[in-house]
Amino acid sequence: MQKLNKQTWTDYNKYPEKVLQFGTGNFLRAFTDWQIDKMNKNAGFNGSIVVAQSTNSGTVEKLNNQDGLFTLFLQGIKGSKPVREHHVINSISRGINLLTDQKEFFSLAEKPELRFVFSNTTEAGIVFNKEDRLNDNLQKSFPGKLTDFLYHRFKAFKGDEKKGLIIIPCELIEHNGRELKKVILQYADLWSLEEPFIHWIHKANTFCCTLVDRIVPGYPKDSIKEMTESLGFEDELIVVGEQYHLFVIEGPKWIEQEFPAEKAGLNVKFVQDISPYRMRKVRILNGAHTAMTPVAYLAGIETVREAVTTEETKQFVEELIYKEIIPTLDLPKEELELYGKDTLDRFSNPFLKHYLSSIALNSISKYKTRNLPTLLDYYEKYQQLPQKLVFSLSALIQFYKGKRGSEGIALADDKEILTFFEELWKDCDGTEEGLERVAARVLANEKLWNRDLTEIEGLTELVSKFLIKIHQVGMKEAVQDVLSVRRASL
């Protein structure tokens, strides 16, 4: 069988390199790369993407072997009907491995046609690392790399304000564009870069805050054989996503002219204030994702669909959304409940097999960003703790033990966080007192939460209670115990 590349794909097109993308992951390929492909075909965008990778994952090599081409399967509800369709995406020109191809990286900074920067480096990606230096071969942080890139462009074009970039981060943190700009300015200060460069950052570059919304399970490992046979060619980079998508961009109105998403029929909104869209999505959809993951996974469930169709975990997620998350939000209740219903429908999409293990990446920072604000708002509003959110925090602590029964869990998080939990659980003797110490140390760790959570009245005791219950009777029975129906019947 032939492999997908420009020789075998007769509709291959080459476009000017207008976009730099930090990240090779499934989400960006199924979201922004797909949208740019649509704009090329339907709105005259006339631009391609150069993908930058700073790890040895091998994705860039696969992309280059396939001339940037990959297949996206979209599966879900479209026009009230279940629809499954696929598209070969032709928006990536090439990939650059920053570990080996730094010359190519900086050469891209010198291209006058370059206009956009997109990124998705997870919630932990937009950080300032004071150890990064301008003369490093490769800065550790994504903002450090971007600052170096922008400084090279500034010098190449002698500060020409017409050569600034539109920077659109897709990381799921509040005010992501503003935060990224703030860190870049921190690097400019750390590296003692000249004042004209700082002026150029402010005047020539536009940093947009964003909200992204599409469920992307990723590589279809369970159905790859069937999909390959239906395509008639081999594609190592097949990715699966749902039909639904929403991209909200907070920025000046003129960006619409350069990013003609509406003309391409895409659900992209350019707004003055992203806050209402962001809070609704992050707290309901992403918050439910993050809270359900350790609970359902430790109950022996593998996918999101199973989690919302299995009786106990389905009830857990529904009560979490309707009784704990929605009551903390200020938007109209009817609108929030409709979004909650849509979220549950999307979770139960019969076409998608979204593995909980793939959602578990960087779960600590995700809980801090997505769930902790809801927990704190609920406590402030009702003067009591939200049971499901606290239970999911206990489940998360248990998850970071790295075991599901006798089976190991491949934890993926910051090395410092993994070391903390490894040492913490190594010192735990399994007694109730030992588990209480585990809970207290996790909650008191300000590096995890940016505050000492033991200061919240009753939280340490309730997290400990749930952690002990999970440890003693297992997740399935512990979930039943925390459900309101079960409590009401006792």
Image (cartoon, rainbow, N blue to C red):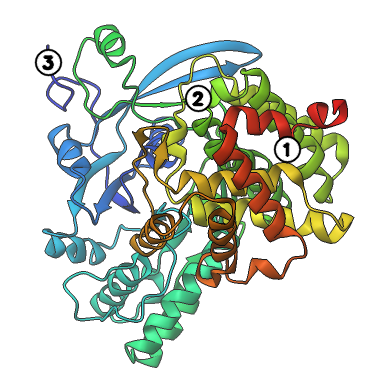
Q: Image quadrant for the C terminus?
A: top right
Label 2 amino acid?
A: Ile
Picture coordinates of residue 180, whole percent (x, y): 47, 68
Mark 1 or mark 3, which is nearer to you?
1
Few, some or many C-alpha atoms within 10 Å of disc 3 (few <14, some 14-19, many ≥20)? few
Few, some or many C-alpha atoms within 10 Å of disc 1 (few <14, some 14-19, many ≥20)? many
Mark 2 or mark 3, which is nearer to you?
2
| Residue for point 40% across, 64% down | 165
| 353 lies left or right of 209 | left
Mark 2, secondary structure of its residue: loop
Label 3 amino acid?
A: Gln
| Measured Cα–Cα span from mark 2 to mark 3 | 37 Å
Q: Is residue 63 above or below residue 311?
A: below
Rendered image: mark on residue 320? 1
In which quarter of the view is residue 384 placed?
bottom right
| Measured Cα–Cα span from mark 1 to mark 2 | 18 Å
| Residue for point 30% across, 26% down | 238
User: Are dots 2 and 3 in contact, CB under 8 Å?
Assistant: no
Mark 1 or mark 2, which is nearer to you?
2
Rendered image: mark on residue 2? 3
Provide the residue designation for mark 2: 301
Q: Is residue 396 among the parts visible in the rendering? A: yes
| 112 lies left or right of 287 | left
Label 1 amino acid?
A: Leu
For marks 1 and 3 on the same chain, the one whose residue lies earlier in the sequence: 3
Q: Nearer the viewer, residue 180 or 132?
A: 132
Q: Give the number of callouts.
A: 3
Q: Image quadrant for the N terminus?
A: top left
